[in-house]
Amino acid sequence: MLSRRIFLKDGAFALVALGFAPSFLTRTAFATGSSARPKRLIAIFQRGALDGLSFVVPYGEAEYYRLRPSIGIPRPNSGAEAALDLDGFFGLNPRLRPLTPFWTSRDLAIVHACGSPDATRSHFDAQDYMETGTPGVKRTQDGWLNRYLQARREANATVFRAVSLTPQLPRMLQGQAPALAFNQIAQFTVRNGSEAFEAAYTGSSDRLLSGTGREAFDAIKMLKAADPARYQPENGAEYPQSPFGQALKQIAQLAKSELGLEVAFAEVGGWDTHVNQGATQGQLANRLDDFGRAIAALVTDLGDRMADTLVLTMSEFGRAVQENGNRGTDHGHGNAMLVIGGGVRGGKVYGRWPGLAPERRYEGRDLAITTDFRDVFAEIVVRHLGVADARPIFPGYAVQPAKFPGLFS
Amino acid sequence: MKRILVFVGACTFLLIGLPGPGHVSASGPGSRLPTDELTITHVLNRMAFGPRAGDVDRVKGIGLERYIDQQLHPERIQDTALADRLAGLSTISMSRRELSEKFEQPLMEARRDQKPQADGEAPKVPPPVQQRANSVVLELGEQKILRAVYSERQLQEVLTDFWFNHFNVDARKGRDRFLLTDYERDVIRPHVLGSFRDLLGATAKSPAMLFYLDNWMSVDPNGPHPIVTPPHVARGPFGGAHVVPGSIRQPPRGKNAKGLNENYGRELLELHTLGVDGGYTQKDVTEVARAFTGWTIENAKQGGGFVFRPQLHDMGQKVVLGHVIKAGGGESDGEKVLDIVAKHPSTARFIATKLARRFVSDTPPKAVIDRAAVRFRETNGDLREVIRTILLSPEFLSADAFNAKAKTPFEFLVSALRATDSDVQDAKPFVQTLQQLGMPLYQCQPPTGYKDTADAWINTGALVARMNVAVRLSGGNESRAQTLGSPEFQRR
């Protein structure tokens, strides 16, 4: 049984077979002399369908206020609880105030009226489609971020190349390329009998298990050296104590530890606001407060590294334009994504705005989609991560730069 | 325990000069199967979820032929100890209707009744109602673990796991969480050693599958059609005949019924029968989907079952894989499609390959696939005979196959519990363990099911997690922890 995991390290296989493989440690990004720092992507999934119209508010639309009498976000300059003006038409939810410096510095871009061409209003199916990158096709086994990792096989990849700060590997990172998932860095260790296990795996003649086992113990040692307990954020960044805030803090720590992190994933729930959604106070506002502070802390903490690092946020679909009888919103269609750092041309809301008039809505009720989410993902894969041909990453989709939103120059 | 966990490599076996299992022509009538411990351990690693203390000796005592034959007839095997273990799980014997009444409907009512709360917090379904609803899939998971560890009908449990995964349904999709108890118990398990066509037909009509792959809302886009009742003669209560005039009723348009949904049609061909390279076209997918329009669920919210609604059915002619299905067939259109795909040679080959991958190796030799596929066609898809062919094949009993498979997390956990003769009083923590090992029970999202090859399960994170589980399972017994966490124990 040959180890594909070992094959993944390209030419390293021959050395492993001969028994004098370079130690995992020396093959990592600790090795000096590599020129450009690798590009990074931090993907954040807002599970449960974020209300994009409260997130990035089209305050220039009278229809918005007519249909949302109790949950609409007030127009800018109408008091302390008003939307924060972005461009004279859109405003940011005031609870996202911590993100405004990045808008001003043009590090934050927004893509609105974006999403999946599939009509489903099922969280289950829509999350699946967003993560596999194949809307309407359920049988896709791997996620699009994993296909990115496959497309760009790195000879020097470490086990920390792709890490998800979640209990299980998300669909987006599942697939042939290795990826790690854990809730907390400190969990990635063997508590008892570690040395005996290491000896058993190192001495095993089972190529697959021996090779993978060596990697595991090397990785454990590397993480231990990074000493998570003593991590101090930089530049005055203050992460919320929430699980989401702490997940982003650990991503920053991994990114700075030079462990070879290239793709990171985090998720945050609580967006399925059918009842009592609230406006600038209440349920949704509380979620946005945590969300905004956590992302602002991450971007602040990474500082200069944000030149190579791109933060992308997404949610499976948006919510209906009209509020429902419970002062909440039901499942909708188009939504907004944030794109921060990585040289994005920020300070702009991308995507054609379809309008909220009844005949401009999707099926008469939801924000229509004018940007296929695959065009956002594909532009990031091509222009930020540097993959020449994104077609294998988005099978069944005609990837065309002409359709990209134009996030990068 | 030492004896159970014999992991001597196959080459050692040959070095000491014993007749290797590869020399045995096992499939011929009257042939004697090997009696050595290595082979018996191997068989127990594949036909069962690994050996328990004493199992190897027991099988040695009765002989492999007899053991295999017994396992192929689970109905003849007493399983009373398992029944005692399962006694505390009240939901696993409930009907769909009862599960709906006791668990789903209270949850729906609680959701309807939830009031906006003044403090702006998310309104919540009262925790006991939610917990009760969650208990259905939790108990199903406990049941699966207990059966795999304690059932004497080990092959039946191995195959139930295999076929559920083949016809995968994810509990997290809507009401499927309340349907899987019935699905595994009444749709999958009774057929795992029966006819493939029966198994396929049972899944096609199960509410779990109809819901999961959306066929319940797949309708003729030109419908709904009027319900036509032709004039007919009726007999009165005293025997007198009178003519009832015909009627035409226009049924209401269902709110979910938007048109043709190809999900089931596609997965039926690609995942359930022919396989992705089985030689069908997009046109076939569409035609299959047309044939299944109107196959839906009756009283879905009350736990109802399959119903055919003619007013939602596309009545035109269909051509599926070159076979013409004449117009006006109604419900029988779907049955004809199932007949066509169950008999298709690609299906025999696809199923034979998948079973050989489960039992022999990740890359099974062509010879065993060929033989199993031929047997599938000869017997019209008699799964007992297909399995028998694989189990008695020289490829299965060959040293090349020994320890060639990596255990999935489920196989790892269950074989560890068996190897250590654990007395599991509460399987809930192990349901949790499988979540941590990345294989949550009944929660595989894509219809492909979980993968059955080493590359899916052996990676850095997985090994670290398994070593930690080994430590936890061993209750402070360090040598036991080392055994369960060893490279050898990750194989079967």
Image (cartoon, helix red, strand yellow):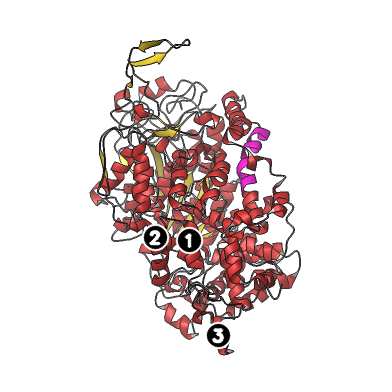
Location of residue B229 by image quarter: top left
Q: Magenta segment, which residues? A: B124-140
Mark 2 or 3, closer to the camera:
2
Tell me whether circle 2 and circle 3 mark residues in contact (CB < 8 Å): no
The answer as to whether the residues below labels 2 and 3 share one chain is: yes
In the image, residue A371 lies at what x, y percent?
31, 41
Would residue A51 appear left or right of B424 to someone viewing this image?
left
| Residue B365 on the magenta segment | no
Spatial CA span between label 1 and label 2 = 10 Å
User: Which chain hosts label 3?
Assistant: B
Q: Amino acid at mark 1?
A: Glu
Task: Please report whichever mark, 1 or 3, sits nearer to the chain's N-terminal start.
Answer: 3
Residue at 44% in and 61% down: B354
The answer as to whether the residues below labels 1 and 2 share one chain is: yes
**What residue is shown with label 1?**
B385
Report helix, strand or loop for mark 1. helix
Does B195 appear above or below B356? above
Task: Please report whichever mark, 1 or 2, sits nearer to the chain's N-terminal start.
Answer: 2
Instruction: Please name whichever residue, A338 or B11, is drawn nearer the observer in this view of the structure.
Output: B11
Residue at 72% in and 64% down: B421
Q: Amino acid at mark 2?
A: Glu
Report helix, strand or loop for mark 3. loop
**What residue is shown with label 2?**
B378
